[in-house]
Image: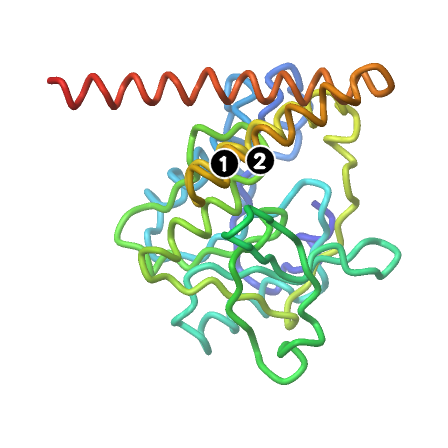
Amino acid sequence: MVSIFLNQEESCQVIIVNNSPDDRSIHRLSSDSIIILEAGENLGFGKGCNLGLNWIYQQNYQGIIWLINPDAYLGESSLKQASLFLKNHPEVSILGTVVYQPTGEVWFGGGDFIVDNGTIIAKNYLSAGLEVEPYITVEWVTGCSLIINLKKFTNCPQFDSDYFLYYEDFDFCKRYAKEGHIIGLTKEISVIHQPSSITGTMPKAKIKHSTYSYLLTLEKHTSKLVLLYRLMRITVSALISLPKNSTISINELKGVFGFVVSALARLALTTNKLII
């Protein structure tokens, strides 16, 4: 929040989605320029963002939205830079920023996707075009720092509600890229992020949600063969590692089980629609 106050030269409104219903202390920040939206429960990242996206869209359907993690920090004048960037490059629909760790190392510098084997990776594109270009197009950008140009959307952009945590940003970018939207990454705007300062306190849930979401993403964006290969590989690996790394293995298996159950439910729903 302090980093946003450093950007007061640029007019903005801060929307905080409170995904922690037991934490009421956040309301002390409420003001004319800081709006607190109560989720009522922990909706997860995507649904929580949707709550904020829908509220903003109703107020200004042509605005600029910057989704920023609560453990990320804006650089001075970042809001002004973001506004100017999209003014100069109005063709960009979704813009990612380079994200640094407090040590100065790059935490996120662009995302890649190898569809043939289902590999989703974060890369460092700082030396691959970003040195000379204002932005490059990429497969996906992190939801830790993601700027949305609402002028490019005929309806309010949404994260898939099937995700609770992890890979929803990848899915968000891939879905809108398929509709023709440009997904860009720039180094002209950057933020600092403290990795895992939130999810690091819940390692079991992190493993389970990450496994589930990864498999869901493969179901949506790769072939059935790749999905089956990865599902079997994760399952076999977890079973082999069970005696030595029971915590990790058990939660990987929970993620696999949750995905299989949800996938069967989606299949049954589709079958019923076809019959009707």
Q: In what element is the residue under mark 2?
A: helix
- The residue positioned 51% from the left and 17% from the top of the image is 40
Residue 163 in picture, x, y percent from top left = 50, 30
Mark 2 burial class by Cα count in 10 Å: few <14, some 14-19, many 20+: some
Scheme of colours in the image:
rainbow
- The residue beneath circle 2 is 230
Q: Amino acid at mark 1?
A: Leu
Against 161, residue 79 (above or below) is: below
Spatial CA span between label 2 and label 1: 5 Å
Q: Amino acid at mark 2?
A: Arg
- The residue positioned 85% from the left and 54% from the top of the image is 102
| Quarter assignment of residue 266 | top left
Mark 1 burial class by Cα count in 10 Å: few <14, some 14-19, many 20+: many
**Which is nearer the eye, 10 or 98?**
98
- Please identify the quadrant where the C terminus is shown: top left
Q: Which mark is residue 107?
A: none
CB under 8 Å between callouts 2 and 1?
yes
- The residue beneath circle 1 is 227
Residue 50 in picture, x, y percent from top left = 44, 36
**Which is nearer the eye, 251 or 1?**
251
Residue 108 in picture, x, y percent from top left = 69, 56
| Image-based side of 239 in relation to 91, left or right | right
